[in-house]
Image (cartoon, rainbow, N blue to C red):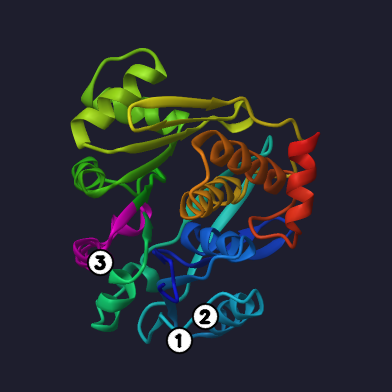
Amino acid sequence: MSTFPVVCYGEILWDYLPQGKLAGGAPVNVAYHLKQLGKNPAVITRIGEDEEGKELKESLEQKKIETDFFQTDSIYSTGKVIADIKDHEVVYDIVKPVAWDFIEWKEEYFSLIKESKYFVFGSLVSRNEASRKTLFQCLEVANKKVLDINLRPPHFDKKVLQELMQKADVLKLNSGELSLISEWFNHFKNDEGRIKSLKEDFNINTIIVTKGGDGAILYRNDIFYDHKGYNVSVADTIGSGDAFLAAMISSFIDNASENDSLEFANALGAFIASRSGGCPVYELNEVRELIKK
């Protein structure tokens, strides 16, 4: 078995929030929760040769996240996002260009990715040609490719997004993103029709649609599964979708049933939304208690 069953690729940054800064970036958040779930992920990303980069790397090492595959950039600074929270929703100003826009291919990635079960990537890292080119090199090697759509205007391109979806084995997106993308390719008015159309157009076997407090839909092997979600007091929604995705991947690795996978992912996503920040300290028993309730 591979030392790293999951490889996460993409952005790493500081989220500058009204209450302070937090280590972030969707791939890093997914990796953190995979680690909490007993899986050992690797992260391919790039930080600046600056104090922010050094501090960011140290903070992740404290969380036991593998940093051996972090690159260092001598020209561009460590990524940052200026985030503002309005009505529990986060509004982002994603600074560019930064170090993670310039991730380079390294030969060691070939065996790292080839030996892993899942390769997780988002659409945001493709905003720059350099990291996008490296991403497509990684996708040529990857086994199960998990695309987490993350539409942050103006940081996405319709043509590139199509190319990424054509590569995906697993697609995760929220209901707003499903509605927007579906308008590009079809005219279905309901989620089931939109999901089926994406599956047929891009030959994606597994599609996951999160619906915030209303739960999530899983479409796998031409069967729909649905979970209504959990009621929690929301602190903020930072990283809750990343926690959800980590739980789904972990459940897939463990060969859990579709219904059990969806139940656990909804519980972890809701639990993280009830805490401040995307990577709070927690015990799995706390998530299991939420499921029991």
Classify mark 3: residues with Cα within 10 Å, few (<14), some (14-19) or many (20+). Answer: many
Q: Do the CB atoms of the residues marked 2 and 3 lie less than 8 Å apart?
A: no
Q: Do the CB atoms of the residues marked 1 and 2 lie less than 8 Å apart?
A: yes
SS of the residue under disc 3: helix
Image-based side of 257 in relation to 19, left or right: left
Choose top left, top right, bottom left or bottom right for residue 48: bottom left
Residue 99, disc: none
Image-based side of 74 in relation to 92, left or right: left
Reply above or below: 277 against 200.
below
Place of residue 278 in the rendered image (x, y in percent of width and height, measured from the top left): 63, 55
For this rendering, which residue is in front, 19 or 241? 241
Disc 1: which residue? 49
> Which comes before the other along the chain, label 1 or label 3?
1
Tell me what residue is drawn at x 43 percent, y 67 percent. Answer: 5
Res 209 seen here: yes
| Residue 138 drawn in magenta | yes
Disc 2: which residue? 53
Reply above or below: 173 against 19.
above
Classify mark 1: residues with Cα within 10 Å, few (<14), some (14-19) or many (20+). Answer: some
> Which comes before the other along the chain, label 2 or label 3?
2
Residue type at mark 2 is Gly
Residue type at mark 3 is Cys
Place of residue 22 in the rendered image (x, y in percent of width and height, measured from the top left): 64, 64
Residue type at mark 1 is Glu
Residue 138, disc: 3
| Foreground tag (2 vs 3) | 3
Q: Main secondary structure of the magenta part?
A: helix
State which region is magenta: 122-145
Place of residue 32 in the rendered image (x, y in percent of width and height, measured from the top left): 58, 64
Choose top left, top right, bottom left or bottom right for residue 185: top left
Q: Do the CB atoms of the residues marked 1 and 3 lie less than 8 Å apart?
A: no
SS of the residue under disc 1: loop
